[in-house]
Image (cartoon, grey):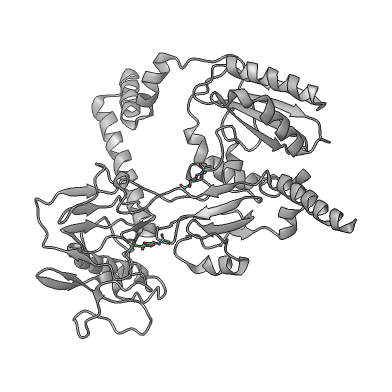
């Protein structure tokens, strides 16, 4: 008798566990920052031997030179801020600078934000932006150990269920994850991604939101990135969807509070089965505790397909005995008016705006000379503004990863070294036909832990030293004042 009931109970338990996990997803971190990826270069070609490589001034992320052995370049224009990650035993050589060297430009620029929905996969287009970045119930998958990772963590603290590398099966233990907090991969003074408490991921998710309570600060962080990409709203009455940063052109069916999420999800999956090619849908717990199904068309919003799907869904749910409280769509499709399409991008460019202003001033009777001298003043003050900004934030970091065995030889007795006793890696870069000191490796008295120096503009390694010396002099004078 008991022999029967025990396995039976186990099966029940499994089903319950499975159903609770059904709202959890694996979310993969997508950005690829490898040197060897052709798409990361402006012309779609990996730099060849003796090319000159240029990084954008605001690279701000780490570039994995890693898997390349015996890389020889005629020059590198370093970014004002960013990291080059060299592999253990990898070698980066600089040949004599050549004026005819072919130029390869790194195509990516700026930080890669944890809070950017575009950096994660694992969810459909029907999902609101907040839920496209990892939720508390989600398992996060970071690229394999061979790949370069560079993440700017969110300002606001967020929780996830687990984190693993894509080449590993087991996620990190919580202690292991916490050990990552000092690593360069995650740039933010606060290590803001935490493991969710076990009971939060295990207990019944009837009130289980993507990130704790409504997390409005975090949502604002996501939307600050996402909103500029919203583009044209292709429907008459866009819906406002919780956690979504743009007007939502799609449909929504809402049900009452008492129904478990899984029940609605199963019914919705069944009802919309035939629409997989045309629409995506997402079942979620809304902030007031009810359950809603969001539907969105793959491709442009037409209105008709959504209307049909929403009607179908409503009827099916009601047949299943689920109480539907609301069913709505975003109305008719709107066409992007041609004039706006043509003028939009044009109006966005500052040049056209300036020209329009110029015309306006002329129209109101200012003389051309008058207007132009005003403009010059504005331009020069803008440039001053930028200069000040540069002084404050600009620095380039060409980093010798301490654990990597990088071929930057440590030759004693070279001139220009300052006596120092910290563990900053100092070095000489080997170049064909000579050696020069890489001034970035001299320790900075004001900043013992970070190898960073203030630079004015992107430079080639060869001209780095003199520029830095100049900079430091000015800097010191500034401090004395
Ligand atoms: C997400 O991306 C990873 C790696 O790029 C891939 O293996 C996985 O299948 C993707 N998942 C989905 C749901 O698209
Ligand atoms: C990393 O790369 C090396 C060689 O490039 C390869 O032998 C190794 O299997 C890779 N490891 C993983 C985990 O992908």
Left or right? Give the position of 475 relative to 213. Answer: left
Image quarter of the C terminus: bottom left
Q: Which residue is drawn at the image coordinates 15% and 56% (left, top)? A: 50
Please tell me how many numbered marks the rendered image carries: 0
Q: Position of residue 217 (x, y in %)?
A: 62, 47
Q: Residue at x 27, y 81 (%)?
A: 418
Q: Tell me the quadrant of the picture where the N terminus can be found.
A: bottom right
Question: Which of the 4 image quarters holds residue 155?
Answer: bottom right
Q: Is 314 left or right of 140, judged from the image as shown?
A: right
Q: Whole-percent x and y of residue 236?
A: 58, 16
Q: Looking at the picture, tell me which residue is in the foreground, 232 or 447.
A: 232
Out of 331 and 38, give the one closest to the viewer: 38
Seen from the viewer's position, the closer of residues 252 and 342 is 252
93 relative to 305, above or below: below
Q: Would residue 157 be visible to someone looking at this image?
A: yes
Residue drawn at (48%, 42%) of the image: 118
Furthest residue to the right?
1
Residue drawn at 15 percent across, 58 percent down: 74
Give residue 392's position: percent from left, percent from top.
39, 59
Q: Position of residue 211 (x, y in %)?
A: 66, 48
Whether residue 88 sits left or right of residue 469 in the image: it is right
User: In this rendering, would 471 be left or right of 333?
Assistant: left
Please determine whether, in this image, residue 150 is positioned above or below residue 447.
Answer: above
* Residue 154 visible in the picture: no
């Amino acid at each position: 008798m008991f022999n029967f009931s025990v396995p039976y109970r186990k099966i029940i338990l499994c089903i319950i566990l499975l159903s609770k996990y059904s709202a959890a997803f694996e979310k993969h971190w997508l950005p690829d920052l490898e040197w060897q990826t052709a798409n990361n270069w402006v012309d779609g070609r990996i730099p060849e031997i003796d090319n000159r490589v240029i990084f954008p001034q605001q690279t701000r992320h780490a570039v994995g030179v890693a898997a390349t052995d015996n890389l020889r370049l005629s020059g590198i224009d370093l970014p004002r801020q960013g990291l080059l990650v060299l592999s253990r035993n990898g070698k980066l050589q600089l040949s004599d600078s050549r004026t005819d060297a072919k130029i390869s430009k790194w195509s990516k620029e700026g930080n890669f934000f944890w809070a950017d929905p575009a950096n994660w996969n694992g969810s459909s287009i029907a999902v609101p932006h907040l839920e496209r970045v990892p939720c508390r119930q989600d398992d996060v998958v970071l690229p394999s150990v061979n790949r370069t990772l560079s993440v700017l963590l969110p300002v606001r603290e967020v929780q996830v269920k687990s984190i693993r590398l894509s080449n590993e099966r087991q996620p990190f233990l919580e202690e292991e994850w916490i050990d990552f907090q000092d690593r360069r991969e995650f740039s933010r003074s606060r290590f803001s991604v935490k493991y969710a408490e076990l009971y939060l991921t295990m207990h019944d998710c009837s009130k289980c939101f993507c990130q704790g309570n409504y997390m409005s600060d975090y949502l604002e962080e996501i939307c600050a990135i996402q909103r500029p990409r919203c583009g044209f709203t292709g429907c008459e009455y866009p819906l406002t969807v919780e956690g979504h940063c743009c007007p939502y052109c799609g449909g929504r069916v809402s049900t009452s509070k008492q129904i478990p999420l899984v029940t609605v999800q199963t019914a919705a999956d069944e009802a919309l089965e035939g629409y997989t090619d045309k629409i995506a849908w997402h079942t979620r717990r809304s902030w007031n505790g009810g359950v809603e199904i969001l539907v969105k068309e793959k491709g442009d919003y037409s209105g008709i397909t959504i209307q049909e799907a929403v009607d179908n869904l409503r009827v099916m749910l009601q047949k299943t005995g689920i109480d539907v409280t609301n069913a709505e769509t975003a109305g008719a499709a709107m066409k992007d008016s041609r004039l706006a399409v043509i003028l939009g991008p044009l109006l966005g460019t500052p040049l056209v705006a300036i020209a329009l202003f110029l015309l306006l001033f002329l129209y109101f009777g200012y003389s051309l000379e008058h207007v132009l001298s005003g403009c010059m003043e504005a331009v020069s003050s803008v440039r001053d503004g930028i200069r000040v900004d540069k002084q404050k934030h600009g620095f380039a970091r060409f980093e010798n990863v301490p654990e990597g065995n990088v071929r930057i030889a440590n030759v004693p007795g070279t001139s220009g070294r300052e006596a120092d006793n910290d563990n900053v890696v100092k070095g000489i870069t080997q170049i064909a036909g000579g050696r020069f000191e890489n001034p970035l490796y001299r320790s900075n008295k004001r900043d013992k832990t970070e190898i960073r120096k203030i630079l004015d503009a992107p430079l080639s390694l060869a001209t780095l030293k003199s520029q830095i010396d100049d900079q430091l002099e000015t800097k010191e004078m500034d401090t004395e004042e």
